[in-house]
Amino acid sequence: MARKTRSPPPTPLTDEEISALMLKNVVEYKGKSIDLDSVITRANVKKYLTLGKLNSKPETWLTSINKSIAGGEDLTPEDESNIAEAKEAVAAFLEDCSKTQQTKFGGAASDTAVLKSAVSSFKYKFSVDAFEIITHVINLFVREIIIHANEECLATKLRVVCPNHVPWNKLHTKLMAGVYFNTAAVYSEIHTGEEEDEAEEDDEAEEAEADAAEAEPDADLDAEAEPVVAPKIKLRQYIQTMFKAIRSSEERFNEVKLSQKLIKVINDIIYQVLDRYANVLKTLLDVSASKTVNGKFALHATKNILQDHIFATDDKTRVVLDVVQERLERIQEEASKRKEDAPVEETPVPTKKTTKK
């Protein structure tokens, strides 16, 4: 087969140009503005952190308890085991709680409705600000990986961006490295990548897969309208939409496509980073004896995760926290302005009825 002709690679972007592209938060894509800080949506993050991680046990118990309250005809041995486990957890909780809570939940062992109320109180709550912060961080590091991989692919004069194009040897000192470098997925890529020879031309099967992915519809970014189905979904469409949006904003990337293999790697990294968030947040909540993750908790968790990296610096951590804080303040200001501009409905004044004499 004749080797494909490649034009010379473009001049590499400077570190400053890459940083500017990574921190760009809005691009025009298919005739509309795309917020690059929320392509991996808040709903995706919310589902996994609440249903999949921090509240997974109470949610499992509540599913079985609700079946019991509905009549119990469909109860399985697993449901019965879940209910027994929930009762044990509530009993342990009652031994060390306030008298008010003991009075409120004391009948949980015999009353299923009380048991449901007690288990519901175990659930952690998240503020909107907390989800916005974590979602922003996820989207930042995904952009960092994609942009650097695109640059490496261009340098090799290939068209399909694959896992071996991610320059891990350069990324470990970049702005967002502290977030994703301490994950099993990155560790695996670094060590398997050392054993693989660099491709000299695009693999036809990979290019065909990339073409098929290109043809798929973009992710629906109207995330709040999505029903909560599974806590952990494949983020392929969202990652692909991020890639396309970045490509549309930078002409040099027009000819490159994203391989399915790299999409899977990024998907795995996202969930492993969310696992790190869940672990850090759980520790912070336990120490503070709180049940609510607010913006302050999310910022502290982000700081801890960023600094848990051998190449972390205070300056880089501060840049990320400032960027995240600025976006949060902007969102809050916009929400406040929308509230102020919203039309006020006037309540009609009832008219007094006159009686005829």
Image: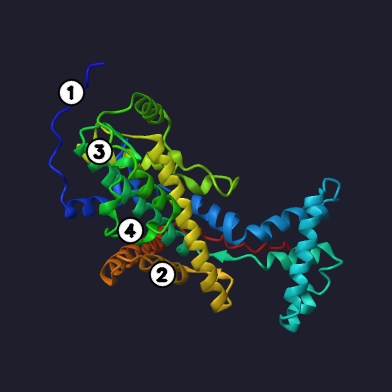
- Residue located at (62% from left, 62% from top): 350
Work out whether residue 152 can be spotted.
yes
Depth check: 52 or 343 in front?
52
Marks 3 and 4: CB-CB under 8 Å?
Answer: no
In the figure, 295 relative to 174: above or below? below
Neighbours of disc 4 within 10 Å: few (<14), some (14-19), many (20+): many
Q: Earlier in the sequence, mark 3 or mark 2?
A: 3
The amino acid type of the residue labelled 1 equals Thr
Task: Report the Cα–Cα distance between label 1 and label 2.
Answer: 48 Å
Marks 1 and 2: CB-CB under 8 Å?
Answer: no
Q: Secondary structure at mark 4?
A: helix
Mark in front: 1 vs 2: 1
Q: How is the image coloured?
A: rainbow
Count of numbered badges drawn on the protein: 4
Residue 270 place in picture, x, y as percent: 44, 51
- Residue located at (44% from left, 45% from top): 267
The amino acid type of the residue labelled 4 equals Ala
Report which residue position mark 1 lands on: 5
Q: Earlier in the sequence, mark 4 or mark 2?
A: 4
Report which residue position mark 2 lands on: 304
Quadrant of image for the C terminus: bottom right
Q: Earlier in the sequence, mark 1 or mark 2?
A: 1
Q: Secondary structure at mark 3?
A: helix
Report which residue position mark 3 lands on: 153
The amino acid type of the residue labelled 3 equals Cys
Report which residue position mark 4 lands on: 177
Task: Report the Cα–Cα distance between label 3 and label 2.
Answer: 32 Å
In the figure, 203 relative to 309: above or below? above
Quadrant of image for the N terminus: top left
Residue 276 place in picture, x, y as percent: 47, 61
